Amino acid sequence: MSAMTECPETTGEFTEVERTVINRLQTGLPLVHSPYKAVADELGISEQVLLHTLQNLLDRRILTRFGPMFHAGEMGGGLTLAAMRIPEQDFENVAAKVNEFDEVAHNYRREHELNMWFVVATEAPDDIARVIAGIESSTGYPVYNMPKEEEFHVHLHFPV
Amino acid sequence: MTASSSPEYLTVVPEIAGVGPVSAWGLLRLRQQLERGLPLTPRPYQALAELTGLSEQEVMAAIRQWQDQGLIKRFGLVVRHRTLGYTANAMVVWDIPDNQVLNLGRTLARAPFVTLCYQRPRRLPDWPYNLFCMIHGVDRQRVLSQLATLIADQGLEQTPHAVLFSTKAYRQRGGRYVSHD
């Protein structure tokens, strides 16, 4: 398990227990009857404290969810990364139009000539082309479609 | 996800390793429940069993099989990295000769601060880059110094690349499908 070389200075925002729980549970949960108990034992805290800490982090929206991250492409859905080149004066307007599409999952402004980058996720692979055509006709700008050709496995871990 | 789109995991005979055939509808319900998150109760797999009509053993075996097949990427916390202090988000893109891209992709993915690494098609003439990495860091300067280290370590000084920091998120949705950011 790799860890990032840097930790942000968030020591003031989280208790020691919260930091321990966040760092440990990013690496996964065991498939045993009482998985929270197993992790709590490992961390030297009680199961009740662990569950309470998790619920509290969810309630404060520090965590989005606890559970599996599904692989859209593998589950039969379509998924791609798309980019657009939008003139400054039109950017906000086009961003609003793009975000009207339910299939747009993330939309970031980035510092480049291609300045709008978003993910398109659909229930069926064939729907990607239709959604991209829809975005092009709604906005009047071309969409660069850059689907994944190969994924390289990383250890996603954000130590706090 | 609707049943009508008949994704692969419903059309293949749902034979789960270790427990044999399992109800396809139970598995669909299990997936829908898991997308909402794992119950925060002492016996979460038992709780999922009660919600889906499967047995606890079937739930655990199905999750294990989905992990082994790569349908489930990670099974743990889905963090809001910005909230954790990781606010610098750089997409680093490289123009790599096609015969070297697999090797370099594997190498870059091993760097501890690289959080995603994909090969994607070039879109010539406007976009020459075919290898994409994400680096999440605490601040820009630190991301740039991590990148400089990576370039020096791998001898990539002559490799064309670009760094695209994000400046604004216009939409971020919960990671039902992807954690791209």
Image (cartoon, rainbow, N blue to C red):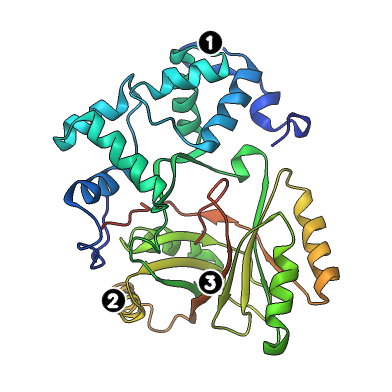
Q: Circles 3 and 2: CB distance less than 8 Å? A: no
Residue A102 shows which numbered tag?
A: none
Determine whether, in the image, residue B153 is placed left or right of residue B135. left
Q: In the depicted view, which residue is nearer to us: A129 or A26?
A: A26
Residue at label 1?
Answer: B20
Question: Tag 2: Cα neighbours inside 10 Å, few (<14), some, or many (≥20)?
Answer: few
Label whose residue precedes the other's in the sequence (2 or 1): 1
Residue at label 2?
Answer: B149
Question: Tag 1: Cα neighbours inside 10 Å, few (<14), some, or many (≥20)?
Answer: few
Q: How far apart in space, not on screen, are marks 3 and 2 (Cα)?
A: 22 Å
Q: Name the residue type under label 3.
A: Pro
Q: Is residue B125 visible?
A: no
Q: Is residue A148 above or below residue A24?
A: below
Q: In the depicted view, which residue is nearer to us: B83 or B22?
A: B83
Question: Tag 3: Cα neighbours inside 10 Å, few (<14), some, or many (≥20)?
Answer: few
Q: Are marks 3 and 2 on the same chain?
A: yes
Mark 3 belongs to chain: B
Residue at label 3?
Answer: B97
Q: x, y percentage for residue A130?
A: 82, 56
Q: Is residue B57 above or below residue B77?
A: above
Q: How far apart in space, not on screen, are marks 2 and 1 (Cα)?
A: 50 Å
Q: Say which element carries label 1.
A: strand
Q: How far apart in space, not on screen, are marks 3 and 1 (Cα)?
A: 46 Å
Q: Residue at x 63, y 80 (%)?
A: A114
Q: x, y percentage for residue A97?
A: 75, 69
